[in-house]
Amino acid sequence: MANKNLWRQWPVLAGSLVFLAGAGPVQLQNMFFFPNRDGIAGTVAASGQIDRTNPFFQSLGTNGRSCFTCHRPEDNWTVTPEDVQRRFNQTQGLDPIFRTNDGSNSPVADVHNVAARRKAYSMLLNKGLIRVERPIPPNAEFELLAVDDPYQYASAGGLSLFRRDEPKFHHHFRSMSPLQFQKQLRLQEARRLM
């Protein structure tokens, strides 16, 4: 029954995503809902609203990205393979998340056509991983003896490390569980209405 109701609400929920994409109000109130693969997710901001004019939603330089490019509310503000695959299929791998500076397996990957892009972005597409390049620090307590990089890029001068961002939901709940926080919000709302 819940899924049946979800599909009835889908046009409203899909329309809500338009607000984040650029149209609609600048401020989004707490518990703004987003459809996801498990049903519906809501976002709560400590300030009581999400300000779409803050730097998180603004382009950061020349690659067409903002933080919002990768950190999506429907994915609990993280990167998921399902969302990345959907975006690749919709844009043939031309969405701003697909950039060789960190989205590809190597910064020198061939991305001249769709098949090449699918191969170049395989870690992002299949695992939701972003590549981070780091040199070995001069005071490292280890020594690099060999490099075995299937993407033919990493070296002692620039190790390629792949990382996946954790969902952001639980980072704000250091002193209480998300359920306790939700209960607290409901109590505050009930007191306000009394």
Image (cartoon, rainbow, N blue to C red):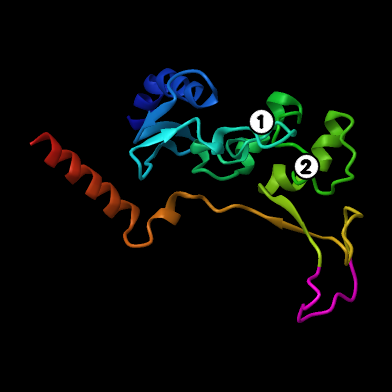
Decide: is 173 above or below 54.
Answer: below
Decide: is 43 above or below 15.
Answer: below
**Residue at image x 52%, y 40%?**
75
**167 and 11: which one is in front?**
167
**Residue at image x 79%, y 80%?**
142
Point out the image quarter for the N terminus: top left
Examine the image and state in which quarter residue 185 appears: top left
**150 and 43: which one is in front?**
43
Residue 61's tag is none
**Residue at image x 89%, y 63%?**
155
Q: Which residue is mark 1?
A: 87
Decide: is 159 above or below 23.
Answer: below
Point out the image quarter for the C terminus: top left
Assess whether residue 142 is covered by the magenta stretch.
yes
Left or right: 47 as drawn, with respect to 147:
left
Left or right: 21 as drawn, with respect to 102:
left
Image location of residue 41, percent across then percent down = 41, 38
Instruction: Kindly report the distance in space between the C-alpha atoms of the residues bearing marks 1 and 2.
Output: 12 Å
Image location of residue 11, percent across then percent down = 43, 18
Q: Residue farthest to the left? A: 194
> How would you rate the neighbour count of disc 2 (Cα within 10 Å): few for under 14, some for 14-19, many for 20 or more?
many
Q: Which residue is mark 2?
A: 121
Left or right: 162 as drawn, with respect to 115:
left
Image location of residue 138, percent across then percent down = 81, 75
> How would you rate the neighbour count of disc 1 (Cα within 10 Å): few for under 14, some for 14-19, many for 20 or more?
some
| Residue type, numbered disc 2 | Tyr
Q: Which residues are magenta?
A: 136-147
| Residue type, numbered disc 1 | Arg
Examine the image and state in which quarter residue 141 appears: bottom right
Left or right: 147 as drawn, with respect to 105:
right
Q: Secondary structure at mark 1?
A: helix
